[in-house]
């Protein structure tokens, strides 16, 4: 795999596909983790006297009214603060204005181009990997670096399209992701997987792949209820993924000893943060109640299982972590992992968001920046945004 260090980038116009898909409210960046994580590659290009051209998507663009809320200009301003230098911004994704800015760039200048998904408004050119668009963007630079792990599982014009037309490499962030995640291909044992989140359906591929490699899979979050239902428990009003019951039955039949399910839950009658909750064993859950977090007995059970792990892979929160009350178990298990220095990979999306707000993200072994990309990697699927570079 060609990495940025393998290419001679000195004095070149380098296009970097970043992942600046960050939450923005009132023109302010709410969480700048992804921007900070792109800095190593950008700074390396600046040290090599490059003209740095940045591309990223932000949200989805389906209709005209999506354009303003997904304008990337706040990211340019924020990046400028982080780099402590001016960051040029192009309001458009193609055309004379953009080309003029690039024409007038000096070495060590940084330009951020408007949200790549602006090109989706008229015929999904970015998401559909429009050939002409990939060629056009490639024509703006001399080298292409893909550093957006979060979109690597999609073939878009701004990753696969450009890489097809320029000498290309992965950046430091993708390199770091692949290094960490590849440990799980032949993991040291005991290898313990923690899975949470809402639906089993989204994780079927990962469960099928990891159940053969893992010593134990600890299931929490809403998805535990589909497994418990499959075992015949009354789960009340708890979230159920009806279509996955048969899958759960099969996994439980084939791998009964490996699957660890919750014993108790934080239970409420309402899906809200306002009501007090009770801790109840699964056997005592009533028809009008729902489990919104795992309970203290289950936390203990999970801790006993991860205590001696050589590596832990964790995807999905153990409760409705958006509500303060029901993020308790997710926070406690994160704390346990950090305090006991258990080598843990947090696999993308919500669990990384939970770890970030609780202040544990920097303290775990690796927090993967990709949601869907991380899951697809773990399922053993090829990631087109990376494959194209591998094959070159
Ligand atoms: P996922 O994207 O599949 O990782 O799911 C994350 C979502 O799962 C979060 O929005 C959580 O609120 C939700 N979740 C976790 N535990 C539960 C639960 N017990 N009941 C309902 N939703 C849950």
Image (cartoon, rainbow, N blue to C red):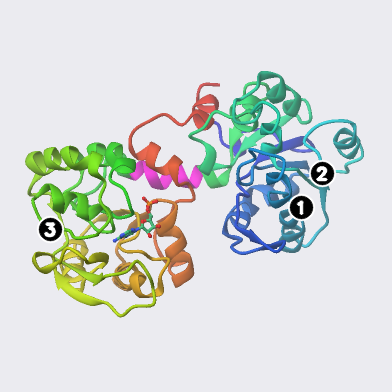
Residue depicted at x 40% and y 48%: 180
> Which residue reaches farthest top?
131
Say which label, 1 or 3, has the lower sequence index: 1
Where ligand 1 lies, by quadrant? bottom left
Q: Is residue 3 left or right of residue 76?
A: left
Q: Quadrant of residue 169?
A: top right
Residue depicted at x 75% and y 48%: 46
> Which residue reaches farthest front?
288
Q: Quadrant of residue 172?
A: top right
> What's the magenta bit mostly, secondary-structure-wise?
helix
Say which label, 2 or 1, has the lower sequence index: 1
Asked if disc 2 and disc 3 are in contact, CB closer than 8 Å, the reply is no
- Front-lying residue, 66 or 109: 66
- Front-lying residue, 196 or 1: 196
Give x and y (percent) for residue 350.
Answer: 43, 56
Residue depicted at x 62% and y 51%: 38
Marks 1 and 3, how far apart at CA: 51 Å
Q: Which residue is mark 1?
A: 73
Range drawn in magenta: 175-183
Nearer to us of marks 2 and 3 is 3
Say which label, 2 or 3, has the lower sequence index: 2
Element under disc 3: loop
Element under disc 2: loop
- Front-lying residue, 267 or 369: 267
- Front-lying residue, 317 or 5: 317
Q: Which residue is mark 3?
A: 234
Give x and y (percent) for residue 311.
Answer: 27, 54
Give x and y (percent) for residue 220.
Answer: 25, 58
Q: Which mark is residue 91?
A: 2
Asked if disc 1 and disc 3 are in contact, CB closer than 8 Å, the reply is no
Asked if disc 2 and disc 1 are in contact, CB closer than 8 Å, the reply is yes
């Amino acid at each position: 795999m060609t990495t940025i260090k393998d290419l001679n980038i000195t004095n070149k116009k380098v296009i970097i596909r970043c992942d600046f898909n960050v939450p923005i409210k009132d023109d302010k960046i709410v969480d700048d983790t992804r921007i900070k994580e792109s800095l190593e590659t950008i700074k390396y290009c600046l040290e090599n006297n490059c003209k740095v051209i940045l591309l990223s998507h932000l949200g989805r663009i389906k209709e005209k009214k999506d354009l303003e809320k997904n304008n990337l200009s706040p990211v340019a301003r924020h990046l400028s603060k982080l780099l402590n230098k001016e960051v040029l911004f192009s309001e458009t994704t193609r055309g004379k204005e953009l080309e003029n800015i690039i024409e007038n760039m000096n070495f060590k200048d940084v330009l951020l181009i408007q949200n790549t998904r602006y090109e989706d408004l008229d015929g999904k050119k970015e998401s559909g990997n429009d050939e002409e668009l990939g060629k056009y963007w490639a024509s703006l630079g001399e080298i292409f670096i893909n550093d957006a792990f979060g979109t690597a599982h999609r073939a878009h014009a701004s990753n696969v399209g450009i890489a097809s037309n320029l000498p290309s490499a992965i950046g430091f962030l993708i390199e770091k992701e692949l290094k960490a995640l590849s440990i799980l291909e032949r993991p040291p044992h005991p290898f313990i997987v923690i899975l949470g989140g809402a639906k089993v359906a989204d994780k079927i591929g990962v469960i099928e792949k990891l159940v053969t490699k893992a010593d134990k899979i600890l299931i929490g979050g809403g998805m535990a209820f589909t497994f418990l239902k499959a075992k015949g428990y009354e789960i009340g009003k708890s979230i159920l993924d009806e279509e996955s019951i048969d899958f759960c039955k099969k996994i439980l039949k084939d791998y009964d000893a490996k699957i660890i399910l919750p014993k108790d839950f934080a239970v409420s009658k309402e899906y809200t943060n306002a009501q007090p909750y009770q801790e109840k064993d699964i056997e005592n859950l009533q028809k009008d109640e729902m489990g919104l977090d795992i309970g203290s007995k289950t936390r203990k059970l999970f801790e006993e299982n991860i205590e001696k792990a050589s590596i832990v892979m964790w995807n999905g929160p153990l409760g409705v972590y958006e509500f303060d009350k029901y993020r308790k178990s997710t926070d406690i298990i994160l704390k346990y992992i950090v305090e006991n220095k258990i080598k843990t990979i947090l696999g993308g999306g919500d669990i990384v968001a939970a770890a970030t707000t609780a202040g544990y993200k920097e303290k775990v072994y690796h927090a993967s920046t990709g949601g869907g990309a991380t899951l697809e990697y773990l399922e053993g699927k090829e990631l087109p945004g990376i494959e194209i570079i591998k094959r070159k």
